[in-house]
Amino acid sequence: MTQSKTDPRILRTRKVIMDSFIELSGKKEFKDITVKDITTEAKINRATFYYHFEDIYDLLDKVLSEVLLINLNAIDFEKSELNEASIIDIFVAITDFQRALSSRCHRGYDETIARIIREQLEIIFYGMLRKQRTTEEDESLKITAVIFSWGVYGASVEWRRNSKELSPEQFIKLAIPFLMSGIEC
């Protein structure tokens, strides 16, 4: 009998595995977590783990992506226009996500986190741009989404490193006039 990936039992098992991983990541560094640790915590066998995930890195990727999507509340952003309020909301969501991870995650996560954040931001910005600029070429919108995603991610890293005396909202609001109107020489 073949089961669909949307079968409630499959979704429930996948969530148990992800929750077990999150629980373990609060106790151990990523490099020290094994598939055996996860299967023991989740009370499943190895075959079940590998049915859902290729390996522990695939699990890490899926967990971080899902947590970020929850933080970004992507459905709301898909309906939003690219404006001052949406840029502020996205920036705050990204900084909140990074802040939440900093208490759980260790150095080994940095590259994965950065990639996941940028990929999700590209999707969100591309959707917003397409909705607003239906006459633009698809490729130019993709490039613009990439630039926005790297810029917002880079700004969030800069805020985390050096600007904690400003709230995320105050920090990003300093750049909003230039982002919204462009830079005129």
Image (cartoon, rainbow, N blue to C red):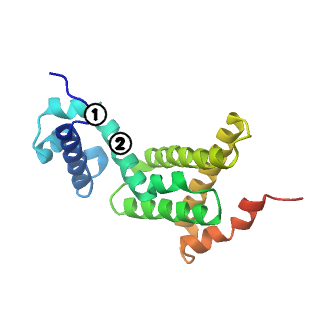
Q: Which residue is mark 1?
A: 53
Between the C-alphas of marks 2 and 1, the distance is 9 Å
Q: Locate the C terminus and report the quarter of the image it occupies.
A: bottom right
- State the mark number for residue 63: none
Report x, y in % for residue 86.
58, 62
The residue sitting at 71% across, 38% down in the picture is: 140
Check the image and report above or below for 32 versus 177: above
The residue sitting at 64% across, 65% down in the picture is: 84
Pick the residue in front: 35 or 8. Answer: 8
Pick the residue in front: 162 or 20. Answer: 20
Q: Secondary structure at mark 1?
A: loop
The answer to the question of whether label 2 and label 1 lie on touching residues, with beta carbons closer than 8 A, is: yes
Check the image and report above or below for 124 versus 165: above
Q: Quadrant of residue 158?
A: bottom right
**Dot 2, how many residues are within 10 Å of its Cα: few (below 14), some (14-19), or many (20+)?**
some
Q: Residue furthest top?
A: 1
Q: Locate the N terminus and report the quarter of the image it occupies.
A: top left
Pick the residue in front: 144 or 127. Answer: 127
Q: Which residue is mark 2?
A: 62
Q: Quadrant of residue 87?
A: bottom right
Q: Residue furthest bottom?
A: 165
| Left or right placement of residue 127 versus residue 58 in this view | right
Report x, y in % for residue 139.
69, 34
The amino acid sitting under disc 2 is: Lys
The amino acid sitting under disc 1 is: Phe
The residue sitting at 32% across, 59% down in the picture is: 104
**Dot 1, how many residues are within 10 Å of its Cα: few (below 14), some (14-19), or many (20+)?**
some
Mark 2 and mark 1 lie on one chain; the one further toward the N terminus is 1
Q: Secondary structure at mark 2?
A: helix
Report x, y in % for residue 141.
68, 41
